[in-house]
Amino acid sequence: MTSEPMDWRSPAVDDLLAAIAALPDREAAGVFLRDLCTLRELHDMAQRWQVVQLLDLGRHYAEIARETGASTATITRIAQWLNHGTGGYRAALARGAGVAARARGDAAAESTATAADR
């Protein structure tokens, strides 16, 4: 979104991004983020990600608000970033993470593959 300052990429932010990118797996990411963030910050980030996924599924704002506890103002802001932001949300969604991927049928493909492995 154009109203945000373009100088958010400071050396400190780049160092943090490098640390996150170097984490080997989900467990390592979890313990790193727990040490880095307060419980409230983790909850807020998780809520934003849940809202993104539900928006991607085409859910209505009121339904998302009921399900996540996010205000419609927050959902509107997240929708603006999803549709007109830097592309980070779309890139993460394209990698197939979260509930949106499962709702699109990726879980069915996963389930079939797991059953075939038995």
Image: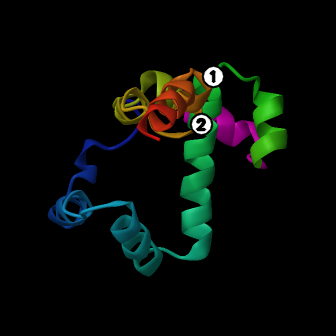
The location of residue 103, given as percent across then percent down, is 62, 26
Determine the residue positioned at 76% across, 35% down. Answer: 64
Closer to the camera in the image, 7 or 32:
32
Q: Which residue is mark 1?
A: 57
- Residue 53 sits in which quadrant? top right
The residue range painted magenta reads 69-79
Residue 4, compared with residue 34, is above or below; it is above
The location of residue 115, given as percent across then percent down, is 51, 35
Residue 54, compared with residue 24, is above or below; it is above
Q: Are the residues flagged by discs 1 and 2 in contact, CB closer than 8 Å?
A: yes
The circle on residue 99 is 2
Check residue 7 for magenta coloring: no
Determine the residue positioned at 78% across, 49% down. Answer: 69
Q: Is residue 10 left or right of residue 76?
A: left
- Residue 90 sits in which quadrant? top left
- Residue 95 sits in which quadrant? top left
